[in-house]
Image (tube, rainbow, N blue to C red):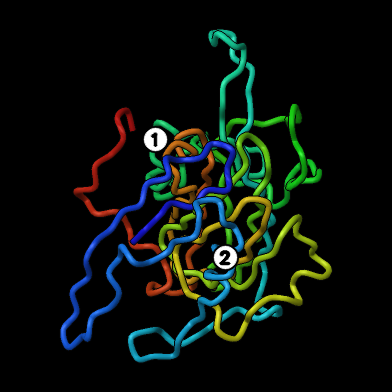
Amino acid sequence: AIRPFSDSSAAPVDNITTGIFQYTNSEGGLNASLITLPVMTDTDAMINFLDQIRNTNVSQNPGINVPADKDIKTRAFITLAVNNLPCNTCVVGTRLVASLNNVSFVSPSIDILQAYYNRNMTGVFTEDFPLNPPVFYNFTGDLTNFNTPVEEGTRVIVVNYGEGVEMVLQATQMGAGGSHPIHLHGFSFYWVGTGFGNFNNKTDPSTYNLVDPPLINTVHVPGRRWVAIRFFATNPGVWFMHCHLDRHSSWGMDTVLIVRNGRTEETSIRPPPSTMPRCPGT
């Protein structure tokens, strides 16, 4: 039995969905109609459940390999927000965009992967995604009538093959606030930390779980909270990172992670096949 969770001012419909799981050699369980679910806005129930998730050392799982502090070469502190931009053709004079570190992603007409393959192709993207927000404020406070300058652009993060990466994803109360499920293509990462309020880079890292953190590819960033993830950049290529709420992704809550080639053929991106389609005009 499933009920939606919401910590946003734009709440979804409070419907309960039920389904059936069938197991072999099972004694069965409670009827879904007998289960009492938390209310849709019960943040404590959500946090208490997520805090119980741990990495289990079983044969189906890869061995735990969490980057230690000494392994981290790239650190990014990324704020998640919904913002307003001026709009001369809009009735209200502004339009909604979404952003990471005040950059609203613009999808180029030429694919970034194709542009990366063809090193002579310029002007498709820039390698200057900010690893820190350009403006620091009370991210999780009352931001009514508060807005920060937002730029549109196709700006990417570039890291070297094999290095340890840490990203702290900070929810903000911009727009309707609330949660954001952030997904990174091409990688599973360790969810090593979470906490309420604004991330403190002096004290909060001491709360990280580097022993048995979950290995996942999408992390839930709750409203008014932060999460920290770590991974080794051992998959060379061009990887999309975005909010899994389609509306936010289409508004620009995205970026791209480029992992440079390693020193060997095995640690390098494969060359494009001869049959690879090309963007028009290239």
Alpha-carbon span between mark 1 and mark 2: 24 Å
Q: Position of residue 225 (x, y in %)?
A: 67, 56
Badge 1 amino acid: Ile
Please state which of residues 247 and 20 is positioned toward the viewer in this rendering: 20
The answer to whether 242 is drawn above or below residue 96 in the figure is below
Residue 201 showing in the rendered view: yes
Badge 2 amino acid: Asn
Q: Residue at left 19%, top 48%?
A: 275
Q: Earlier in the sequence, mark 1 or mark 2?
A: 1
Q: Residue at left 58%, top 70%?
A: 48
Secondary structure beneath dot 1 equals loop
Residue designated by label 2: 160
Q: Position of residue 281 (x, y in %)?
A: 32, 28
The dot on residue 223 is none
Residue designated by label 1: 110
Q: Residues within 10 Å of mark 1 (few under 14, many from 20)?
A: some
Q: Residue at left 73%, top 46%?
A: 133
